[in-house]
Amino acid sequence: MKYVKIIMLTMCMVFCMTAISFASSFQTTDTKYGTIGSEGISGSFVENGYNIKIAFVPSGSQMTMYVGKDNNVIYNAKFAYHKYLRIDQVYDNNSGKYAYIIKASDYMDGGDGFVYLMGYDTQKDTWQVYVNPANYYNPLGKNAEPFIYESDGDIVLAYFQMGLHQPAQEYHFFWDENSNWFGYKDYGIVQH
């Protein structure tokens, strides 16, 4: 009987560790970045057999984002012009979901711009804005800028002020196949 309890306890621990290990499963699979010049900038990504092309074309103080799937425009939106662009393609190993962290800024370090988590919705055959930082509570005030990034398998939205060991408000996102959308967990204010 003692051995049965030990075996059951061991199996439970292995199961728990496996669940913890695979709960976060995003990884960055491709990155495109550069300066948004007068001709604009674009990047192409392979996603589940599709070719996704994301382009930003400037016009005065604005720029238009175009998203194409297999050479057909499926999304466009206007944004304020920013000088630098970075697009990280992230992939969920569990569900096969791709998404894109799109950051535009006026500085190389990413400040004073915008950041979104977007992606192609295969069920609706459309481009979606999954995470817009304006829709999440920022208790640190207007000086705490939003950043979205992949870290240790999680997609994280963090509001923080630049500086050493500054606190950050964090939200961790995961793909929910049942709702076909990103769910999240509010981690509150985290000390870095």
Image (spheres, helix red, strand yellow):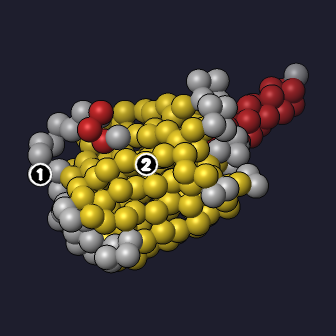
Q: Position of residue 115 (x, y in %)?
A: 34, 53
Q: Position of residue 149 (x, y in %)?
A: 42, 56
Tell me the quarter of the image containing the C terminus: bottom left
Residue 159 sits above or below residue 83 on the image: above
Q: Position of residue 112 (x, y in %)?
A: 19, 60
**In this rendering, position of residue 174 left or right of residue 21:** left
In which image quadrant can residue 9 be found? top right
Tell me which numbered mark, 2 or 1, is placed earlier along the sequence: 2
**In this rendering, position of residue 6 left or right of residue 169:** right
- The residue tagged with tag 2: helix, strand or loop? strand
Q: Residue at x 40, y 55 (%)?
A: 65
Residue 121 sits above or below residue 164 on the image: above
Residue that numbered label 1 is attached to: 143
- The residue tagged with tag 1: helix, strand or loop? loop
Tell me the quarter of the image containing the N terminus: top right
| Callouts 2 and 1 close, C-beta under 8 Å | no
Residue 78 sits above or below residue 39 on the image: above
Residue that numbered label 2 is attached to: 76
Give the residue type that dot 2 points to: Asn
Q: Residues within 10 Å of mark 2 (few under 14, many from 20)?
A: some
Residue 133 sits above or below residue 111 on the image: above
**In this rendering, position of residue 170 left or right of residue 11:** left
User: Total label count?
Assistant: 2
Q: CA distance from mark 2 to mark 1?
A: 29 Å
Give the residue type that dot 1 points to: Asn
Of labels 2 and 1, the one closer to you: 2
Q: Residues within 10 Å of mark 1 (few under 14, many from 20)?
A: few
Q: Which mark is residue 84?
A: none
